[in-house]
Image (tube, rainbow, N blue to C red):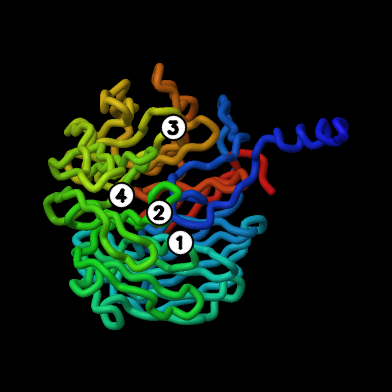
């Protein structure tokens, strides 16, 4: 053994992570956490540099960044469009548009789900259930289908919102069909591999259960656990809300799962490690309507509240994940979404204000705030990749900000 060789390798292993892609909904791991650790936290009288911006149409599709390119969806003039942008220049490299109904959905409308980049292809679904696999470099269609027409799906009230996810080379879709509400496709061809389940679709995205070959699905009836091999159901926990709205992502903490919904439902910490689901605690003090929760060092951060006249009473909170006890809470931000970057909560609220807050359970500390978007109902979670923060308004303004070292 050559000790000098290992002394040379050790510093390389200890290098800080200052660049990482954000290739799908919620980032690399789908937990809304970036591993980058060079976020600028002290701003004084400065503001973030705006690298570029675009107008892309209505919607709530967040931004992804992968291999030097950024993507999102937007709706305008009877078409749903997907945009590909060079992140360094800000140039739109291609735009693919498809006919799509706006639908009467009781709010602004537009695209709901977030695209996914995987192995040179881009996967996206529209609020009307159209699913596309495109070449991520050129935007040409490789295959497409419609969840209602081709898979017997039943569109939920506010449109399809779950983002495409690929697990073990399978593209997973939630169709809401009574004859196979959960579907796995061959990601290369779009062929059906299996169909299972009979739950109505809600608005959360399916996710792998810890590191197992199991899948979590948060649908209109609650949470179900499925085998990835054939979609067969292993376990189920009922968590119904008014209007069938379960939209915040289930938060996995080991074998424990934290579910949260608004409309008077609240939150429940459950354990799925055995066939008999164990409820560890429940609370109505945490009710996340849309924004997903974030777990960091044993504490959960999120936004409690509901859109509409009550939105102004929403609270940002820190909660002990073991007990469900609220450690601190702060009013004044309204609804919005959170991600975690470099020990900091990056909050984009519904009025377009960007806020940096320490992810600190001991005390609430706000580091900086900037008004970066206009309008209202800005519920789209920001995305952070390679020092760039992507923010998008519901009206369609896409802003890319420099918040750390960029590559």
Q: Position of residue 26 (x, y in %)?
A: 44, 50
Q: Quadrant of residue 161?
A: bottom left
* Front residue of 244 and 226: 226
Task: Give 138 or 281, whichever is nearer the viewer.
Answer: 281
Q: Nearer the viewer, residue 55 or 190?
A: 190
Question: CB atoms at circles 1 and 2 under 8 Å apart?
Answer: yes
> Badge 2 is on which residue?
208
* Percent position of residue 62, x then y: 43, 55
How many other residues sit within 10 Å of disc 1, few (<14), some (14-19) or many (≥20)?
A: some
Query: Between disc 3 and disc 4, whose residue precedes?
Result: 3
Going from N to C along the chain, the mark reached first, 3 or 2, is 2
Q: Is residue 328 left or right of residue 91?
A: left
For marks 1 and 2, give the CA distance: 7 Å
Q: Residue at x 64, y 58 (%)?
A: 68
> Which of the two discs, 3 and 2, sits closer to the camera?
2
Residue 166 percent coordinates (x, y): 46, 63
Name the element at disc 4.
loop
Left or right of residue 369: residue 49: right
Mark 3 secondary-structure assignment: strand
- Asked if labels 2 and 3 touch by Cβ distance under 8 angstroms, the answer is no
- Residue pointed to by mark 1: 167
Residue that carries the numbered disc 4 in the rendered image: 377
**Could you tell which of marks 1 and 2 lies nearer the N-terminus?**
1
Check the picture and name the quadrant holding the N terminus: top right
Q: Which residue is mark 3?
A: 296
């Amino acid at each position: 053994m050559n000790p000098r060789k290992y002394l040379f390798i050790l510093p390389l292993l200890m290098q800080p992570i200052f660049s990482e892609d954000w290739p799908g909904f919620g980032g690399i791991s789908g937990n809304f956490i970036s591993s980058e650790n060079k976020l600028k936290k002290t701003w004084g009288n400065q503001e973030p540099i705006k690298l570029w911006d675009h107008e892309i149409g209505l919607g709530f599709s967040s931004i992804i960044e992968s291999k030097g390119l950024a993507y999102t969806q937007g709706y305008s003039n009877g078409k749903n469009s997907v945009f590909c942008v060079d992140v360094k220049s800000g140039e739109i490299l291609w735009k693919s548009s498809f006919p799509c109904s706006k639908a009467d959905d009781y709010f602004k409308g537009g695209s709901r789900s977030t695209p996914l980049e995987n192995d040179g292809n881009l996967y996206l679904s529209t609020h009307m259930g159209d699913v596309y696999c495109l070449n991520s470099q050129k935007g040409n269609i490789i295959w497409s289908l419609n969840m209602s027409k081709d898979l017997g799906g039943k569109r939920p009230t506010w449109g399809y919102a779950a983002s495409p996810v690929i697990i073990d080379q399978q593209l997973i879709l939630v169709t809401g069909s009574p004859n196979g509400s959960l579907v796995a496709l061959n990601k290369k061809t779009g062929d059906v591999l299996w169909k299972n389940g009979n739950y109505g679709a809600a608005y959360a995205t399916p996710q792998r259960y810890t590191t197992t070959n199991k899948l979590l699905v948060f649908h209109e009836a609650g949470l179900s656990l499925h085998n990835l091999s054939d979609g067969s159901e292993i376990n189920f926990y009922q968590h119904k809300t008014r209007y069938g709205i379960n939209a915040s992502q289930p938060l996995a903490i080991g074998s424990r799962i934290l579910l949260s919904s608004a409309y008077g439902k609240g939150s429940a910490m459950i354990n799925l490690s055995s066939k008999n689901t164990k409820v560890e605690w429940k609370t109505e003090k945490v009710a996340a309507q849309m924004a997903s929760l974030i777990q960091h060092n044993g504490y959960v951060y999120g936004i409690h509240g509901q859109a509409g006249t009550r939105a102004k009473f929403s609270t940002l909170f820190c909660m002990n994940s073991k007990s469900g006890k609220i450690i601190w809470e702060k009013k004044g931000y309204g609804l919005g979404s959170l991600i975690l970057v470099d020990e900091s909560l990056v909050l984009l609220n519904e009025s377009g204000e960007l806020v940096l807050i320490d992810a600190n359970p001991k005390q609430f500390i706000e580091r900086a705030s900037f008004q970066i978007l206009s309008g209202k109902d800005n519920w789209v979670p920001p995305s952070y990749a390679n020092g760039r923060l992507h923010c998008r308004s519901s009206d369609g303004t896409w802003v890319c900000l420099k918040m750390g070292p960029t590559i």
